[in-house]
Structure formats: C-alpha cells, structure tokens
Image: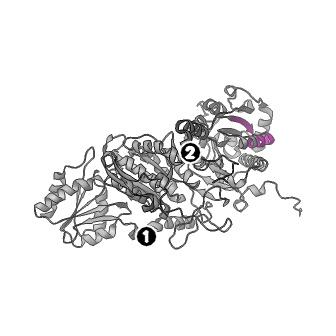
Amino acid sequence: MKADPKGVLTGVHFMDGDHAACEGALAAGCRFAAGYPITPSTEVVERFASRIPLIGGVFIQLEDEIASSIAIQGAVWAGKKAMTVTSGPGLSLMMEHVGLAAITETPCVFVDVQRGGPSTGLPTLPAQGDMMQVKWGSHGDYEIIALSPNSPQECFDLMIKAFNLAEIYRAPVFFMMDEVVGHMTERVHIPEASAIEIVERRWTKKRPGEYRVYESGADLVPEMVKAGDAYRIHVTGLTHDEKGYPVMNAAAQGKMVQRLMDKIRLRKDELVDVRREALEGAEIVVVSFGITSRVAGRAIAEARRKGVKVGHLRLVVAWPFPSAVIQDLAKRVKAFVVPELNMGQMALEVERAAFGRAPVVSVPHAGGTVHEPQAILDKILEAAR
Amino acid sequence: MSEVLAENPVLSYLRQDRLPHIWCPGCGIGTTVNCFARALKESGLDMNKVVVVSGIGCTGRVAGYMNLDSFHTTHGRPIPFATGLKLANPELKVVVYSGDGDLSAIGGNHFVHAARRNMDIMVVCVTNFTYGMTGGQVAPTTPIGATQTTMPYGNFENPFNLPFLADACGAVYVARWTVFHVRQLARAMKEGLAKKGFVFIEALAPCPTLYSRRNKLGDGVDQLKYYKEKSAIKNGADTKEAALSFQGDIIVGKFVDRERPTWLDAMNRHYSNVFQGKYRPYGQPYGVSNAKD
C-alpha cells in the first residue's frame, strides 16, 4: 500500500538526520512514539511531538527508557505502528524489552543515535559502539534486524524500510544512526506519498476461534490481530505454544526459539542490503557502515590514486550480517579493511565470515570524532603491501 | 455423585482451557479474580474491549487466566505497556492486574507517574506482603517485624502505604479491601471499571505458603480470620492514616473518589485550544461509536 499523505512532508528540505528520521517514521505510518530525553537522539522525538498533533497520533515522554520501550509494544498490540528513540545509556535500559518484542513478535522500531560509551561516555559526540549490543544485548537467543544510514536522506529512506521490515518479519528493528549522521544537515528529498511503498501489518483473515496467535505458515511469521478485535488473545513473555499459552518445557522452548531464529536466518538473503563499489578486481575491500563509510570514501579515493585496487562494501543492513557476501569476496581479495567507530565490533563478523581465507584489518576508533581518513588509508596501504 | 446444578456464574470470564491455575491452596489471588470476574459481569462493558495487563509474579499470572485480550508483560512494566495500549486505542478499557512487588518495587516509578498523569487505567494490586513466585523475599509492603528469606531476622525496612502513595500522586479512585471483603472488593472493581482516570484498588491477600508459614500465622483461613477481626471500614478515611503493621489493624474502604482530566482529555483539550479548528480530537473514549468514521 501507499503512504498516508497526512504523514508525508513532500518536498526538498535542508534537514538534519534526526529530523529526517522522524519524517521517515511519519511517512512510514508511525503514529505512536514514546521516549525519554537523551542526547544526541532527542531531536527525533522533539520533531515527532511537534508534528503529530495535526497528523493524528500520540507522543508521550515517559519516565524512562524502560517505560518507553514497552509502551510502544502496547501501542503496537492496540494496532499502531510505533517507535522509541534513544542513545547508548537508554538503549542499555531498553534491553529487556528488546527480548520481549522478540519473543512476542511485536513489530516495532528502536532508533539508536549512537554516542561514545561505555556508560555516560561522550553524550554529544559520535560512536558506533552499540553494534554488538543490538545484536546480543538481551538475554537468550533471538534475531533482530539493524539498519545503518549514512546521511539525512538515508535517515528518511531507510526509516521507511525499517518500519516495513518490522512488519514483514515481526521482529524488533534497530535504526543505527550516530551523532554525526543525526546532527549533520543536508538536502533531503521527500517524495509524494503515492511514491512511498508501505507494508501493512499482517492482519489475519481468520475468525476468532480459528485464529491462533503464534501459528505460522511457510515463512514462519504469524499473522496478527489487535486488542479489542474479539480474538481474546493471550500474549506472554514466557515460552509459549501456538495459542500463546505458557508452556514450561524443553520441547516448547526448542520449537519457539528455533522459529524466532529461522524466520530471519532462513530469509537472510532477502534481507541483505549492501552497497558495492568497485568490488570487481579489488585486492582490498573496505567494509564500512554509517558515517564511517563516508570517511572511508576519502581514504579509498586516495589509495586508488596511489595505485591500489580498493573496493568498498557498505552495510546498509548490518544485521543480519551479509556473511555470504564476505565469504564470496574472501576467496578473491588480498584483505579486508574494517574501519568503525568502536574498538573492532563488526570486524569480528567480517573475520568470522572470511574464515581465514583473507586477513581482516580492523581500524578501530574509540569514538568522539570520526576517523582521520589518513588512519584508514594507512591500513589500506599496509594491507595492500 | 453430585449433580451439576448450575454453571459457575463467572466461568465464561476465565480461560477454562488453562485451568487448573498455579496458585497454592489458601492463596488469595483467586478470590480477587472471582471478584474481578463478577465486577466485569456487572459492569455492562463489552468484554471484547476490556484488556488485562499483568507483570510478573504470582498475581502476574492473572492475565493468562482471564478470557479477555490479555498481556503478560515484563516484571514491573504492565503500567507502561497499558499506557501504550490505552493511548493507541482509547476505546479500550485497560486493567492492570499485578502484585505489590511488581507494581510498587520494580514498577514503582511507572506507578507514580501514571497516577500523576491520570492515565485512564484501572490498577488492581494484590498485596500479599511478599514475593511469592521466588520463594518469599521481603517486599516494599512487608510490615516491620515480619520475617522473609531476605530479612531472616525480621524486616526492619519501612513499608509503603500504597493507598497514600496513589492518593498523593493523584489517583482519582483509591480503595483498599481484603479478600475477606469479597462483596466490597467486587463493588470497588465495578466502580473502578466505570471510572475514568487512574484507579487504584489494593486487595490484601494471604500467601499461606510463604508469608504466613514463615511468620507462623497459620493457613489461609487464619489470615481471613485476621482480616475479619482487625479490619475497620472507613470510607473516605485520610489515606495517611491507612498504614499497615504486622498483624495490626487494617483500615479498608473507598478512600478517594474524585474527578480530574485524564492525560488524553488534557491533551485533546489543550491542542484544541492551541490549534483551534485544525485539531481533530484524538481517539474515542470507551462506549462512543466510531460510526462517523
């Protein structure tokens, strides 16, 4: 279906990434947001709070991130599309509810504008240090989806994709911005509503009595209903059967957890979204994401001037990780270079996928600013030697 | 063999395929559920529009036994989940049903803020003075002097007076009853279901397995006797005076019944002023038809 024009601010704007992310959410049909102030993400909800009254929806600033991350799930089960927005310390508080969204298969979007950590760290300065936390942060086994925009335009475009993926897979989706992407101001083109494709919730056509809340078909994603529709559903964070009823045994646990993993893992190929640049014949491939991809661009251009054949693989969807793409490249490249604003998180994934077939050179940075292009260039040249 | 003369009048309000329930013999939670089912029956509400939300713990299991749309959430967080439900669809009647530990310890912050905002939800708190599911640890409601596994020499921590807390934070309806007072409790729940705004109903209930046993208070019946002997009904009592003590006097009654605009009403009123005719009031309260849409 097409976007509801009420939420679409069609036109060309000069806008920062936080605001563009909010516009993306509104265009995607998000009509409920809950959040707690935290730098550098607050502008997303500030804009939502100012825009939503005349669009028709609700913003509520709650008492903390714990409340925000579960209020959105209540809103989803009442039929709305919903998001919460935060940064590192708030994300840490939300972790239990990431697990709740995963086990109850509640489609919702968590926006994380990353800043330096650990703890209060660097509230106003960038990092990309939450990449592993969103993958592994809540206890137990589950799968999530994470997107990584590198510009205000992508904050808009990919936010729509984030909401759509949440509905398709019924899983929590993370929108992994960083302070620079959030606060940089660039041209943002917002198309007509009729040009924006929106995925509606997978409402069941079954009648009450026939419908089972966690029964799924071939794609392993159950259909949904909302509270108030006479289905009398039970939804629990306990291990449950297809009826949604708690079942405390290993067989039910195995069946449920396996499906939560498989509904994403088995369709990983559909989820992979990478930008490939000059990978044909490349001897070095730089793997990057978010703001670091733009810094790496300069280092790559410089390396090429020095005669090194450098390709660039940018992760638009960071999770699930595009292992097959890396595996394939590992057979023919001399090395991977992985710059990121953390001490080497996604480099571990590249290393895992490369499986020793090509060395992986991490270019870590603790955050606070972006890399000096020279630091990335040095590693490219070193790897090419 | 006895003949079945009539069906239990509240059976259709329960998920019969989930019975028997997990609660211990003598536990008071089931009694509160019976009162709740009767209140639902008499409320005149459309049961397809009533949603029950629980947290974690023994009382947290209530959601799973009600034949309603029901959500069993995380520990301490049923109130913010309910807030999301209610704000996303104001047509729903949302009831939070949880225990004293869930609502006033780990969920205490959400409790005070939802009351402050006058969020339009009814909160039923079953107070059994202990963490039953985990084996009887000290709760924010445990009276001084009672022994619990994590207060093995007797509790020395000052407990909450929950009606006073709810009152101070702005709840529009505050009542306390015990599971001895089944008619009054059911009536309070019925009134609460009809009330708009943050409703707080505390139901004192025995936990014979952990609280009573560890404190040598006998079984569930002994606690009912205590409730009967030591309770004084004081409707309209100052909640400040309603603090509890170990096996001491219990003040029960309807303490608060007042009107305040709900969060959503305040939002709609405010934005109608700010944006004038451009603002379309958000949502429809319970019982208002959506026909014009």
Instruction: From the image, tell me which residue sits under label 1.
Output: A267
Identify residue type, mark 2: Pro
Range of magenta residues: B173-189
Chain of the residue under the numbered disc 1 shown in the image: A
Q: Secondary structure at mark 1?
A: loop
Q: Residues within 10 Å of mark 2 (few under 14, many from 20)?
A: many
Q: Quadrant of the C terminus of chain A?
A: bottom left
Residue at (52% x, 42% y) in the render: A60
Label drawn at residue B80: 2
Q: Residues within 10 Å of mark 1 (few under 14, many from 20)?
A: few
The answer, for residue B15, to whether it is visible in the render is yes
Q: Is residue A79 left or right of residue B49?
A: left
Residue at (56% x, 35% y) in the render: B273
Q: Is residue B31 magenta?
A: no
Q: Do marks 1 and 2 both belong to one polypeptide chain?
A: no
Q: Closest to the observer: A215 or B224?
A: A215
- Image x and y of residue A163, in percent: 46, 58
- Image x and y of residue B102, in percent: 59, 43
Identify residue type, mark 1: Arg
